[in-house]
Image (cartoon, rainbow, N blue to C red):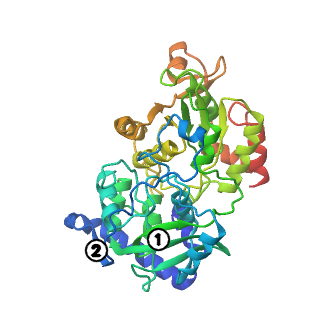
């Protein structure tokens, strides 16, 4: 567990390591003291003239009859599209910048989701007032529900409000940003409100304390080019064009390879009374950064592709999301529902302990098994997405996969295989039972182990 907690430090230079460890220690110390001054959770460093319309909805630029007729309305009423369309517009935007910055993998995910409208109605990184309102209230200042803050972090002392900066991924120009303000967040307070804890054993708190920079900056994004990834990520508008406009679309979120129980879960969800006739499921895995011991996104993508071909049918669609996981439990469930709403989904499957996490020291769960489901049920009507609680399925010798209640009622013989045992068998070259995992998925995992 301690090794997992330290993995983010292993690739740092000695000076970077010293800085990050110092920040982590300060974050832990802040846990004990930050909440005595709860009315002042962040301190402004500098601010330009306020721009009240920075986070107003942006009209859809590229729409067709299918998008306009899509059953689900985008969050806030209009799907944001910040990507410039002509080379001349892009050249002019780049010429207006005075600096260039390389994006971290997590920042790259956030910029892409801002550009393509997945974070609608945002059109930029949150300023201090918006950030604080989301942290405190799970909503934007307008009252529109929003699960987690979307922030641009930096350690750069020279960056200032008013700066126009080119954001890059290697040699590729991704976007420009015009910064609106710069502030010192109270990170311990943010983690306590968003993750339910500011303990550094939580992967989200660890990320905030050791990966994010000292400052947060608000700013308006202008999109230039989508990132080039090993896994294709369609925009919300592109996904909407592929979905039927007259049936329910239920989203299934995952960050791990899909095994037999997952497959049974999302295919059987289409029979739930909450789903209308002829509904379809959108399997929409996140392939961006997650917690340290998860399988890399590129490997996960390969498992999804082989399974997509093996189980192909008209009522199951597969797309990929460049999202950076926080492991924030209930609040992250709301974030996922909101994002999938922008992709055209009307329903969302909420699994047990969705986006949950354990302490890297004690192994204790940070959230209850049904906390995310309960919070989604509470917020779903306001959000406009219907949560679909996942079935608690078990495998039995007699009848295959059934609900746990049915297995108990019929006194069926259950078979169990823990994730830890599965990984041990995988590494040891042992045969994996087909009731637990697809052979095609196991093959990919072993080839990329």
Q: Work out whether mark 1 precedes mark 2 in sequence or the reverse, and give the earlier one.
A: 2
Callout 1 crowding tier (Cα within 10 Å): few <14, some 14–19, many ≥20: many
Residue 400 relative to residue 159: left or right: right
Location of the C terminus by quadrant is bottom right
What residue is rendered at 39% in x and 59% in y? Answer: 55
Q: Secondary structure at mark 2?
A: strand
Q: Which of the 4 quarters of the picture holds residue 157?
A: bottom left
Question: Which residue is denoted by mark 2 in the rendering?
Answer: 43
Tell me: residue 183, above or below residue 226. below
Residue 116 seen from this side: yes
Between 318 and 21, the one lying in front of the other is 318
Q: Position of residue 156 (x, y in %)?
A: 46, 82
User: Residue 250 at x, y = what percent?
Assistant: 54, 33
Q: In terms of depth relative to the viewer, which is nearer, 143 or 429? A: 143
Can you identify the residue that label 1 sits on?
210
Please report the residue visible at 33 percent of the width from the left and 61 percent of the height from the top. Answer: 130
Q: Quadrant of residue 93?
A: bottom right
Classify residue 45 as left or right of residue 217: left
Depth-wise, is mark 1 or mark 2 nearer the camera? Answer: 2
Q: Dot 2, how many residues are within 10 Å of its Cα: few (below 14), some (14-19), or many (20+)?
A: few
Comparing 39 with 327, the one in front is 39
Numbered tag placed on residue 21 in the rendering: none
How far across and how far down the image is residue 257, in percent? Answer: 65, 45
């Amino acid at each position: 567990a301690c090794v997992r907690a330290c993995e983010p430090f292993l690739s740092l230079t000695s000076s970077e390591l010293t800085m990050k460890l110092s920040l982590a220690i300060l974050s832990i110390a802040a846990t004990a003291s930050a909440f005595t001054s709860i009315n002042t959770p962040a301190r402004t460093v500098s601010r330009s003239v306020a721009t009240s319309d920075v986070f107003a909805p942006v009209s859809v630029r590229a729409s067709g009859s299918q998008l306009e007729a899509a059953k689900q309305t985008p969050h806030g009423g209009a799907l944001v599209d910040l990507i410039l369309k002509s080379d001349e517009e892009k050249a002019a935007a780049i010429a207006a910048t005075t600096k260039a910055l390389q994006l971290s993998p997590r920042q790259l995910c956030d910029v892409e989701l801002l550009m393509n409208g997945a974070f609608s109605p945002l059109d930029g990184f949150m300023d201090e007032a918006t950030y604080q309102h989301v942290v405190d209230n799970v909503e934007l200042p307008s009252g529109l529900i929003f699960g987690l803050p979307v922030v641009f972090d930096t350690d750069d002392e020279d960056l200032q409000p008013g700066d126009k900066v080119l954001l890059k991924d290697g040699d590729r120009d991704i976007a420009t940003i015009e910064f609106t303000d710069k502030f010192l967040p109270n990170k311990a307070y943010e983690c306590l409100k968003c993750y339910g804890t500011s303990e550094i054993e939580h992967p989200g708190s660890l990320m905030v304390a050791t990966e994010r920079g000292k400052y947060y900056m608000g700013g308006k994004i202008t999109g230039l080019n989508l990132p080039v990834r090993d896994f294709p990520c369609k925009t919300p508008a592109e996904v909407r064009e592929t979905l039927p406009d007259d049936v329910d679309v239920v989203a299934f979120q995952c960050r791990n390879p899909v095994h037999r129980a997952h497959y049974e879960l999302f295919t059987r969800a289409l029979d739930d009374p909450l789903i209308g006739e002829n509904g379809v499921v959108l399997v929409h895995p996140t392939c961006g950064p997650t917690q340290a011991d998860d399988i890399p996104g590129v490997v996960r993508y390969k498992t999804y592709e082989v399974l997509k071909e093996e189980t192909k049918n008209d009522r199951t669609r597969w797309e990929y999301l460049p999202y950076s996981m926080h492991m924030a439990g209930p609040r992250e469930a709301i974030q996922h529902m909101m994002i999938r709403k922008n992709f055209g989904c009307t329903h969302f499957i909420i699994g047990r302990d969705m986006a949950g996490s354990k302490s890297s020291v004690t192994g204790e769960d940070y959230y209850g098994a049904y906390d995310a489901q309960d919070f989604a049920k509470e917020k779903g009507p306001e959000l406009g997405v219907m949560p679909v609680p996942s079935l608690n399925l078990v495998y039995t010798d007699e009848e295959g996969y059934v609900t746990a209640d049915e297995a108990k009622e019929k006194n069926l013989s259950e078979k169990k295989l823990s994730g830890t045992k599965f990984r041990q068998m995988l590494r040891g070259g042992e045969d994996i039972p087909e009731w637990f995992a697809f052979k095609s998925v196991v093959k990919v995992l072993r080839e990329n182990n």
